[in-house]
Amino acid sequence: MDLSIYLPVAENAVSIPLLLGLGGLVGFLSGMFGVGGGFLMTPLLIMIGIPPTVACASDSNQIVAASASGTYAHAKAGMVDFKMGTLMLIGGIVGGTLGVYVIKFLRAIGEADLLIHATYVLMLGGVGSYMFFESLGDLRGTRRSRLNRKPDARPSIYARIVARLPWKVHFSRSNITISALMPLLLGVLVGVLAAIMGVGGGFIMVPIMVYLLRMPMHVVVGTSLFQILFTCINVTVLQATINHTVDFVLALILLAGSVVGAQIGARLSERLKGDQLKILLAIIVLVVCVQMLLGFLVAPDILVGFKGG
Amino acid sequence: MHTPKLIGEGGVATLNRRAFAIVFSLVTATLALVAAASVSPRPASDEPLLVDPPVVTARLFYHGQPVRVSGTIPAGHEAAVVISDEGQSHVALKIKGRIWGVLWANVGEMTLDSVPSLYLAATSTDLSNLGDAALLEGMTLGYDALQSRSQISPVGAAAEDRRFFMEFIKLKEREKLYAIDEGGVSLQPDGAGGLRFSGDFFFPPDVPPDRFDVRLLIFAEGGGKLLASSDLVVTQAGLAAGISTLARERGLLYGLFSVMVALAAGLITGFVFDLGSKGGH
């Protein structure tokens, strides 16, 4: 019995169990680590024959469901910093708009694709490696904890700059007091990078919250999902209105898998230590990085590709 | 009112008889031809080209459709069947190449015009046995013929253009939207002096809804001609058509609906899992 379904906007037929499995896997990662999973799902959808524009738009639609499911689970556990998330979201929207112009400039000067992919590999490699070794050190107990630092130790340049910024606000869920400019500016940075790389930005956002905002890992996951939810609502409506590329049938099957995966991921996330979560996310980020790097080094079997693909 | 006589009464009678005779002869001849056509066996070449099914309908559980093309051709001929939408598509392609001798990346762009979105061909023998390159090109049969009809931009050296065109063919073949099956048309005597042919094609699910030409070409002694042609329509129907139309024509409404369903699914699942976990404790 053929368990495939015809996708009316993608104009192709795809196996239902395969889509449910992909949705479940990416939803699980989303609920567990607070990433949207677009960096994983979109290439997988393209690989199974979905046109790239439809893959991106429909993935955004399914991320709405997975992130809503994950945000709900994390919010029930008190692990969403809505104040921090809202500020970063505002920054992200500004950054995303700026990023669109940056990409236009990059295309105008040529070799934009190489620059974009190189940025991607460097970001993934840098963030993944740092998270991996830092978490590994913590898990082994070999790394000196920030809390165990000598009280007279001179704070880093970054810490001194952050301390001098105005408009200090206390974020009770994260239990930190920092300038409101920090989440806004970091949100802009993530928005710019996400627009350049064409991804949701969750896997950049999570390390930034952990290492630059010093938020607890469990609150980071829920807060990241909260932002991703709104970003993807915006993207879905815009894609449906302007490009007509949202395939509802595709999104519906993916989300049927992802909402369940997100719940399982969120529950498992609560049972793991922050460092365990970080090292697992680091491994996934590094695997994607290596896969992208291989794409640069291994000769493609066909020397042309459809534009937009 | 006076009507001027142009000819005599006898002349009128003669004219009427002649006119009657001419009309009678024409009617009789027509009836005889129609009768002859209906009772005598039709020449093999006049058999209609049969496309089964003539309409491919994509519904929600559509996953491609086998299509059989059959009919009769005169004895002593080879046959080729081509299904395509000739020369309509404009395709933008990225060219991949090496940068700094190490990295593979997109190094340029090209466009192809007048190339079909679908090109499925099957022949009763090898293409080279059907006729020379000029004949095949004139009948748009084979990838060389497709290239000669296409326009590549920017125009490069002939060898480079050829290389990238063949890479484009590989891309389309991987999508199963281009295929040439040499020997895929079977020929058998029809018992009436002609040959019965049939060719089986598979329409993959990613063939876009459109009207396609089905052409039956016949070849003998280095020459060839188009014997018959027909239409094959791919269309969406039912819920698939409804969703596609809504996505195209009511984008904002469709987008909002998609978001609402996703939000509801996410929140309801969260709520159900929450209840489940509470029940479990």
Image: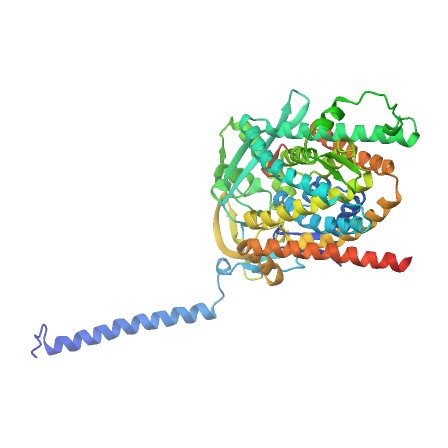
Considering the image in quadrants, where does the N terminus of chain A appear? Answer: bottom right
Residue located at (56% from left, 33% from top)? A101
* Location of residue A144 by image quarter: top right
Residue located at (21% from left, 76% from top)? B17
Q: Is residue B225 left or right of residue B107?
A: left
Q: Is residue A141 left or right of residue A281?
A: right
Question: Where is residue B127 drawn, in percent x and y?
Answer: 57, 42
Question: Where is residue B85 drawn, in percent x and y?
Answer: 52, 49
Picture layout, residue B99 above or below residue B20 = above
Residue located at (51% from left, 26% from top)? B157
Question: Where is residue B41 drawn, in percent x and y?
Answer: 49, 66
Q: Is residue B74 left or right of residue A65?
A: left
Question: Where is residue B135 drawn, in percent x and y?
Answer: 48, 41
Residue located at (84% from left, 38% from top)? A277
Relative to the observer, which residue lies in front, A290 or B36?
Answer: A290
* Location of residue A191 by image quarter: top right
Relative to the observer, which residue lies in front, B49 or A185?
Answer: A185
Can residue B141 be seen in this snapshot?
Answer: yes
Can residue B80 be seen in this snapshot?
Answer: no
Considering the image in quadrants, where does the C terminus of chain A appear? Answer: top right
Relative to the observer, which residue lies in front, A199 or A291?
Answer: A199
